[in-house]
Amino acid sequence: MAFTFAAFCYMLALLLTAALIFFAIWHIIAFDELKTDYKNPIDQCNTLNPTVEKVKKIKRVKIALKLVLPEYLIHVFFCVMFLCAAEWLTLGLNMPLLAYHVWRYMSRPVMSGPGLYDPTTIMNADILAFCQKEGWCKLAFYLLSFFYYLYGMIYVLVSS
Amino acid sequence: MNSTPNGGAAPPYQNGPVGQTYPSTYPPGYYGAGPQQQGYPTISGHCAPALNKFPITNNDHSAYYHHNSHQQPIAAPTPSAYRVTQGSHPPSQPYVTLPTSVAPPNPQQAPPFQQPSPYAPHGAYHGQQQYLPSQALIYPQQLNLVSATPSSQGTPMYPIVSYPSAPGSSQYGTLRSSQAPTGPGAISNLIGAPLHQYPPGNGTSHPASTAAVPSGHSMAPPGQPATVNGQGNAVQAPVLQHYDQSHQAAMAHDHYGVTHNTGGADRDRPPSETPFTSSPGHQQGGDSSSTTTGSASPVPNSYDSLEGGSYPESSIPPSADMTKQAPPFGYGYPSMQPAYQQRPSPRTDSSPSHGRYNQTGYQHLSQPFPNMSQLSAALGGLSGVPELEVEALRPVNLLQERNLLPHRPLDAPEPNLNADLKKANCSPDTFRCTLTNIPQTQALLNKARLPLGLLLHPFRDLAQLPVITSSTIVRCRSCRTYINPFVSFLDQRRWKCSLCYRVNDVPDEFMYNPVTRSYGEPHKRPEVQNSTVEFIASSDYMLRPPQPAVYLFVLDVSHNAVDAGYLDVFCQTLLENLDKMPGDTRTRVGFITFNSTIHFYNLHESLSQPQMLVVSDIDDIFIPTHDSLLVNLKESRALVRVLLTSLPGMFSQTRETHSALGPALQAAYKLMSSTGGRVSVFQTQLPTLGAGLLQSREDPNQRSSTKGVQHLGPATDFYKKLALDCSGQQIGVDLFLLSSQYSDLASLACVSKYSAGSIFYYPSLHHVHNPAQLDKFQKDLERYLTRKIGFEAVMRIRCTKGLSIHTFHGNFFVRSTDLLSLANVNPDSGFAVQMSIEESMADTSLACFQAALLYTSSKGKRRIRVHTLCLPVVSQLSDVYAGADVQAITCLLANMAIDRSISSSLSDARDALVNAVVDSLSAYKNTVSNLQQSGLIAPAALCLFPLYVLALLKQKALRTGTSTKLDERVFAMCEFKSQPLQQIMRTVHPDLYRLDTISDEGALHLNDCIVPQPHLLHLTAEKLTREGAFLMDCGSVFYLWIGKCCNDMFIRDVLGCPNHASIPPNMTQIPELETPLSERLRALLAWLQDSRTFSSTLHVLKDDASAKTSFFQHLVEDRSESAFSYYEFLLHIQQQMTK
C-alpha cells in the first residue's frame, strides 16, 4: 500500500468533483429560478458568466460566483492530472464530457467577454430546457464519477 | 353654445367626478340625492360625467386613438359582427318584449321597465362603439322627459350639431361609421322601448316625450340634420382619414359646452318617486346570475364617458337555449338604487334588495340555472357553426384548383364559438391565434403539424377603447389575470377565473356598475363586456413616478450624412412636428450629433443661442454638463427651433468621414439613464471609431449565392449589451439607417431589437439621386414623430392553464417566461408568440389568452391595456385543421424561419419552411381526408398555405440565388419580426388589382366618394395583359403598372398623359384630375392607404425593362431565376410527401 501519484490524483479528483457537484446543483437552482420568474435573466447570466463587469449596473449585490469557466477549468485540470498519472480508463471516461465542454464553449453566442449564456436568448423555452437538462445530466455524471474516483482511489491504494 | 339656459349645469357636472370615485364610497347622501335622478337614473346621471370627462380623454388618449383609425377600412368591407347581429339582438329583445308582456297588469310593475328604458337605446347601440352618437340619441330623450316640449330640444342638441360642423367632422364620421350600421335599429328601438317604459313619476307627459324621441332622429328637426346625416353617411363611410390633433383640442372645448348643457338638463329633471319594496335576497339573484358574456362593443374612452351610457346594456345569456328561461339578470338589478334611496345605510346591507316590481324579472332569474359544467359546455361554442367548419375542411386539390384567391383580401377565420363569445372576443387585428381551434393535447398538435402561436398588435391605434378608472382593478388572486368577458360569475359575489379556474370574490366596488349607475351587476361592468379595455393604473403599478416623455435625437453629421442631405429633411420635419409630438408640459428633448467627435447642445432657456459642447475623448465618453442637455420642450422651444434651423448649415462643410456611433450611443445612454425615454439614432454609414466599431463583412460576390448567407448575426455584442442596459433604464433606441453602402445592420439592429425600438432602413437615400426615398423618409419620420408612444412598458401574456409560452418574437427583452420588458412601446410594432401545450386541456372547452400591456402614457399616466382572446378547445384533428388561420401561420413560420436562419443557416430555415407545408399537408392527407384522390389535397382553410410559403421563400429575407444586399436582407428579417400581421402579409403576398376595367360593382360609398373594390388577382404574369393597368399593393409601396397597349383614355384620365410613351419615367403620384376614373382610383389608393399607418409610396411603372426587377419580383407564382413557380412548388411538395 503506497501513496502513488495516481492515488493522489484520485483524491484530488474526489475533492474537486465534490465541488463540481456543488456547481451543478447551483446551476440547476439558477435555471430553476429563471424559469419560475424569480430572477432577471440579465442578473442571472451575469452570475453565471464570468464577465468583467464595468458598464453594468447591477443593483442587487450578489456573491458573484462565476460558474462556467471554473467548472470547465477544474474538469480540464484533473483530466490533465489523470493523463499524467496514465490512468487511461478514467481519462477515457472523462473524454466525452471534456469534448462536450469544448464544443459548448466554441458554439457559444457572440460575446465580448467569456461566458456561455446570453440573457436575450436564455428565456427561450428550448434553451432554458436544454440548460436545465444539461444541469441534471452533469449532476448525475459528477455523482457517478465521485463514487468511481472513490473506488479508483481505494483500488489504487490497495493494489499498489 | 347655449350654456345660459342651462346655467345650472354645475351641480350635476360636479357629480361627474363624484361618480368616478363612487365605487369606493357609497355615501348614503349620494343615493339620497338620487331621487332627483331616479326617474331616469341611468340616462341622466351618466351623461353629465361622461361629457365631463370627455375632453380629458380626448386630449389625452383618444387623440391618438382617433388619430389614425386605420382599422376602419378593414372593417368596412367586412361588415362587422355587430352589424350582422344587430337586427336580432337578443339583449335588446327582452327590453322591448318583456315589458309588453308583464307591464300592463300592474302599474307597480312598470318601474323596472322604466329602468331599462335607457338601455333600449344602448342595447340597440350594441354594435356602436361611440359614445358620441349615443349621446346624441340620449339627449333629446332626456330633454323630452324633462319638459316634453320640442322647443327645448334645440338647446341640448347644439352640441350634437356641433360635431359634424367641426372641422374634424371626419373624425366623428369615423366614430359614427362604426355605429352607423345599427342606426336604424337604434332608432326603432328608441321608438319601441319607451312605449313600454313609462316611469311612474312622469305620468302622462310621457307619451309625448317618447314620441318626440324618435322624431328627433328620424325626422331630423333643424338642429339635428347634421348629426343624422352624419350618421347616415357613415353607414357607407367606414373610413376615415386622419385627423389633426390640434383640432381635437378644439373639439375638447365643444365638449365642455356639451357638459354644461347636460348639466342643465339633469338639474331640471323632476324627481321621480319610485316605489320600493324589498324583494328576494340577493342570494337568489346570486344563483341566477351566471356567466356573463359580453358584447364586444367598444365604448368611449373613459370610464366616465362609459357612464355616459353609450355602454351597451346587454347581458347575454350564456347559451341560446337559456335565453328564454333566464332573461338578462341585469335587467332586474338597476332598480336596486331605489332601495338605497330609502335606506340610509346601504353598505350594511350588502345584499341588494330589489324593488317589488322587479319581482317579475326575478322570477325569471330564480329559475333553475344550469350547473357549471353545462354552462361551460354551452360556452364552449358547441353550438357553433358547423357549416363554416365544413367549408373550412372542404378538400381542395391544389394541383387542379387554379383560382384559390378570394375576391377580396382574406379575413381572419372566425373561431367556432357561440355568437355571444364571438362578439365579445378580441379583434383579430389585435390578437390572433394560428389555430382558432386549440388542440386539446400536445400530441394532437403534433399530429396536425401546424405551429401554435399568437400574433399580437397590442398597442395598435384604436378608434375606440373603453378606459376604466377604478381604484381597484379586479384581478384573479392566484394568476393575476385581469377580469375579462370570459370569466364566469358563479353568483353575484364570486367569479371564476377563465385562466386558472380559481374562484375569486367580487369586490364591493365592482358590484356597482358605472354605466347604469346601478348596483349589483358586476357582469355588466365594462371590463366584463369588452375584451379590449384600458385601465388607469394606481400607484401600485409604478416602480417610480411616471416618467415624462423624453426624446433624444442622435444625428450622424459625418461627410457621408451631410452628402445624403437627410439633415435638412429631418430638421424641417421635426420643426413642423415639434408641437405634435406626444407629451405634456414635462416633455423634454435633447440633441447629440456625432462624427469622429460627439457634440452636445446646451439648450438652456436662459441662453440666447444653443451652445455646442464637443467631447473628443470618445474612448471614455462623459457628459459635459448635466443640467441643460435635455431641456423642457416648452421652456426652451425657441432655442430648439434655432438649433433645428441652424443645424443643417453647421456641418455643410464638414470633411470628417468617420463615425463614432458607439460612443455617441454611450453618451445617449448616460444622458437618458436617469429618466428613460426614446433615443432616435440616425446613422448613415458603418461605425468606424471607438467602442462598437464594425468591419465590413459583406462579400458582394456572395450576394446571390445559393449556398448560404453568412453574417446574419451580429459581429459584436456591444450593441446588444448597450441595448440591455438601455432597456434596464427604460430607454428605447430607434434606429434610422440611411446608408447606401454596407453598414452591418445585423450588428446595429441589436441596439433596437433588445431595447424594444423600431428599425427603419432607407437604402441609398440621397436628396438628389433618390428624391423618392427622401420623400418616403420624410413621411415616415412624420408618422414616427407624431405617433403615440408608451414608456417604461412591460407586457405579460397569460394563458389558460395547460398552455405555456415557448418563444417570443419581436423587439423587446424577455424578462421572464411570460413577461416582456419594453422600454418604449409604439403602435406600429407587432409581436409573435409560439405556444406549446404542456398539460392536456381535456377538462376545459375554452382556452383564453390575455395580453396585458402596462405603460406610461406620454401624459404621464400609468395605464394598462388588456386584450383577451378566447378560443374553443377541440379534440378532433379535423377541427384543428378547420380552424387553421393560414395568414397567422405564415407569419409565425416566417418568424421561426428567421430565428432559424440566424441561429443555424438560411438553407436550414428554407428547408424547414418547405417541410412545414409538406408535413401539415401529409398529416392532413393521412388522417383527416378520407378521399383517396390523387393530387395534392389541402383543407380549404389551408389552401393558400403552399402559396404563402412559396411567397415567403421568395422574400428578400429568405431568398437565395437572387442578388440581395446583406443589409436589405437583414432589414427584411427585422421587419418580419416586428411588423404586425397585416403588414407582413401585404409584403409577403401583395394584393394585385386590375384597374382599367374597374367598375362600381360592389364599391364602397364613403363620404361622397366611391371606392371601387376590384378583385384580387393571382400574382402571376399570366394575369397581366398589355392592355391593362394594374395596381400592386406591397404594404410599404404601391406599384401602378401600365401595359404597353393600355387604353389611351385610361392613361389620359388617370395619369394626365396623352399616351403610353409620354408617361414620365419616375412618376410617383397620380395627378388630381377631375375625371371619374381618376377620382375612383385616388379614392381606392386613399382607402388602401388608410389601412396602414406609414404612408406608402406609389411608383408608376411602364411596361418596359426597368420595371422588371421591382415589379416582377413580387409575382411570386412565377418562376424566377432560381426559384420554383407555384406549380413546380406544388409538384415538389407532392414529391416530398410521397417520400
Image (cartoon, rainbow, N blue to C red):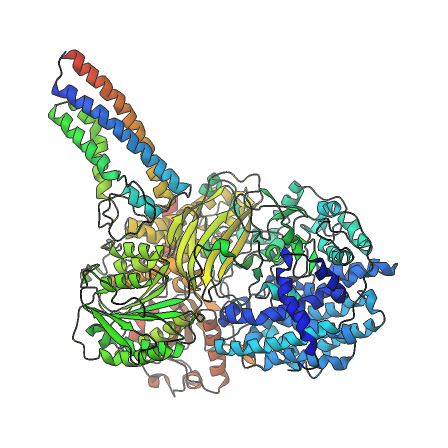
Give the quarter of the figure containing the N terminus of chain B: bottom right
Q: Tell me the quarter of the picture where residue A127 sits.
A: top left
Give the quarter of the figure containing the C terminus of chain B: top left
* Residue A114 x %, y %: 22, 45
Q: Tell me the quarter of the picture where residue B1033 sits.
A: bottom left
Give the left or right position of residue B944, taking residue A97 as reference: right
Give the left or right position of residue B305, taking residue B1028 as reference: right
Residue furthest to the right in view is B105
Give the left or right position of residue B558, taking residue B124 as reference: left
Res. B84 in view = no
Q: Tell me the quarter of the picture where residue B223 sits.
A: bottom right
Residue depicted at x 57% and y 39%: B843
- Vertical comparison of B1101 with B806: above or below: below
Along the line of sight, the residue nearer the viewer: B861 or B688: B861
* Residue B70 x %, y %: 49, 69
* Residue B275 x %, y %: 83, 59
Tally of numbered discs = 0
Residue furthest to the front in view is B606
Along the line of sight, the residue nearer the viewer: B857 or B811: B857
Along the line of sight, the residue nearer the viewer: B561 or B350: B350
Res. B489 in view = yes
* Residue B673 x %, y %: 33, 60
- Vertical comparison of B174 with B649: above or below: above
Along the line of sight, the residue nearer the viewer: B488 or B628: B628
